[in-house]
Amino acid sequence: MTWINVPDGSPFGPENLPLGIFRAGDEEPRMGAAIGDQVMDLAPVASAQMLDGSQVFAEPTLNSFLALGRPAWHATREWLLDLVRNENNRDAVEPHLIPQSAVTMLLPFEVADYVDFYASEQHATNLGRLFRPDSEPLLPNWKHLPVGYHGRAGTVVTSGTDIVRPSGQRKAPADDAPTYGLSQRLDIEVELGFVVGSPSKLGEPVPVDDFMDHVYGVVLVNDWSARDLQAWEYVPLGPFLGKSFATSISPWVVSLEALEAAEVPLAEQEPAVLPYLASENLANYDITFQVYWNGQLVSSPPYREMYWSPAQMLAHLSVNGASVRTGDLYASGTVSGPEKDQRGSFIELSWAGREPLTVNGEERTFLVDGDEVTITGSATTPDGHRIGLGSVTGRILPGA
Amino acid sequence: MTWINVPDGSPFGPENLPLGIFRAGDEEPRMGAAIGDQVMDLAPVASAQMLDGSQVFAEPTLNSFLALGRPAWHATREWLLDLVRNENNRDAVEPHLIPQSAVTMLLPFEVADYVDFYASEQHATNLGRLFRPDSEPLLPNWKHLPVGYHGRAGTVVTSGTDIVRPSGQRKAPADDAPTYGLSQRLDIEVELGFVVGSPSKLGEPVPVDDFMDHVYGVVLVNDWSARDLQAWEYVPLGPFLGKSFATSISPWVVSLEALEAAEVPLAEQEPAVLPYLASENLANYDITFQVYWNGQLVSSPPYREMYWSPAQMLAHLSVNGASVRTGDLYASGTVSGPEKDQRGSFIELSWAGREPLTVNGEERTFLVDGDEVTITGSATTPDGHRIGLGSVTGRILPGA
């Protein structure tokens, strides 16, 4: 399928072609496509072919490319597919293939607004049990709308950025008053993030069937969470400092067009949703994540079982007329499956610390300074074909 | 104090000199300072004087100016004060004074992250009584930390932008299931917004005493709210669509340096706050707002009684290491005083619709299509001197 050498098991086969921003040495950051373990340097290839609008490939973020819209995204994908499939392109492309090991990947796009949903029934149920043990775990609104909230766009960081342990206020139920100090319950959340390309107009909701006209693709998200800060602060206006210190995303943005082959129908929703959330075409993706804690696989959350589809999230987010902008990121919320080894956060895996895990022979509940978490993910198509999302990683540094 | 004609009662006297972005005819938008009922076109004045860095005045947002930091903000203010005080500058300045009636004011800065606090004890108590009638109105965390959450930066609009009535899900307690439709409880929130100029570093909290090194100035904020959408959606992750359709801000940013003369000490906080929120120098501003509903004054909320100071809000927002960026906007939350005619939202003024107001002879609880709300505000100094914030206005258009 390609004249380029793609190692067996590579997440980045010739059907995937995710886009990102790389820096090679002290050159200006610019756009690349991943193929196997190489980066295709798009600006010189496009420029040599006198491709219309090729200057977007030389920019230091994907935003200008994302703003071009679906026809341009499709044309770019067709161009890339031809480059890697057709050996006639070898002379034009080969000089511009750079080993991924020789470049630094940067934040792929400037994040406009960041919204975090809560779309896994298993996760919402688990958290409800842990945070509100005396009431029904799922609140009455949960099956009527995809619950979500705004997060901090300015602290979305690229994979590999160190995470400084946050400080703040915590209060255990037994304590009289809160205390200030380092978070003792530092956690992860495994999520899928959706990257908006085409903006919408203020006052005009995005119909549920227009999802692919606005969203370009996906990234892996690790929504780091300080559970002790969150538990004390979150009523009545929701999580704030428990989440806002850092959210890590993977450097390669995989297009929805590449992911389409891994679509699965959304499971039936009961009760039936309101018409603005309904469609014949609601889909999920057959993606499985892997969570590595200091290199040890501790969980494999499945995306295909998420209750709310990403098209519903976008329709809901905009039903009040809120506009979306190029660079908006909305994440699915923690992905947890029904099995214990499918839970997407450590508060669930360790059941709030009561059931420690053994990681490389050491006991763990929440994150310890120096710990490293890497999340990988890939979609599988019915023909067994794999579309990798790459990975997002981060290490905990001691806080001040 | 100035050779420029400033009408009696103008919010924009020669000590104020707020900055904004104006468009005159079909010229490029650029930075101006308000003086009386005129705009001083700063780019040509600065350019003629060969002022260092004068190109920032020609930009279409304040962001580059804001990023220059406190010494540059101070130097600019000193330059402006000299321009308006010293009649020697008349020849250089007078050709660049444009009537405010001849320009259009635009969004003054590109909003990075938007955070909304909840810092009025009266407002939080009133809302607690209305939203959670069966429990203590103030939740246990309220006096320990300034409760806040992230809002939608992309739907912050400038004064004068029409507000389309939002639709979404509502469920009255008596209903079995939610319904979709136009919000029937469209409301305002009178707030003061703080505009961040100098960024901070990820992982490094901003000390409470560094407030003026990071925040350039203030704007008036009307945080439009759909109370019926909010009441159904807000558990457990906080307000989302009930707020995200629009937030209006005033076009003129008044500097903290101009406001300093109107500082008042923060009232004593009991229980004592944790050390990261404590300082000898905590201050509020002696600002009074006026709320006009279709031209009729319905409320005059006082800012000086806010429980949390803006310096504490910034220290709290960043205590977990979250960085701030140029263009961040954080708002105080609704300003409500103890008297009925000092409440900063219609849900409070009409006590959730149970006590209608008479507005120009018509009964009102929440906003009706075609209604217009204008909020003005000004600070008063001990010598009776007035520093106006201008106004923020918006009219409700029917929803689809």
Image (tube, coloured by chain):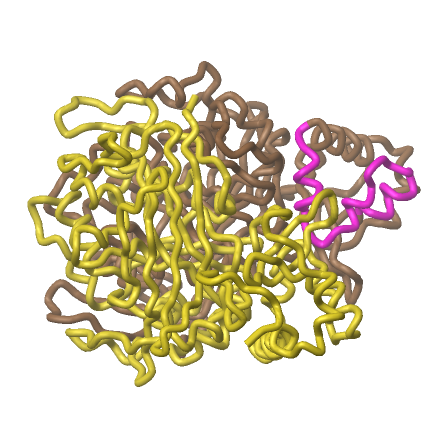
Chain colours: A yellow, B brown
Q: Quadrant of residue A208?
A: bottom left
On screen, residue A103 versus residue B268, left or right, reads: right
Q: Is residue B65 magenta?
A: yes
Q: In terms of depth relative to the viewer, which is nearer, B308 or A1?
A: A1
Give whichever of A393, A100 is nearer the camera.
Answer: A100
**Left or right of residue B229: residue B263:** right
Q: Position of residue B333 (x, y in %)?
A: 39, 43
Residues B304 and A190: in front is: A190
Q: State the image coordinates of residue A260 (x, y, percent, origin top left).
A: 42, 76
Residue B312 spot, x, y in % from top left: 43, 28
Residue B118 in view: no
* Residue plotted at (18% across, 38% down): A352
| B244 displayed left or right of A15 | left
Please name the residue shown 40% across and 19% down the image.
Answer: B278
Q: Which residues are magenta?
A: B42-70
Position of A244 relative to B248 (above/below):
above
Q: Please indicate whether residue A173 sits to the left or right of residue B368 in the image.
A: left
* Near-viewer residue (B394 or B164): B164
Q: Residue at x 8, y 49 (%)?
A: A135
Establish if A118 lies above or below A322.
Answer: above
* View extreme (left): residue: A134
Dividing the image into 4 quarters, which one contains the C terminus of chain A? top left
- Asked where in the image residue B51 lies, by quadrant, the reply is top right
Q: Position of residue B313 (x, y in %)?
A: 43, 33
Which residue is painted at 36% across and 73% down in the image? A384
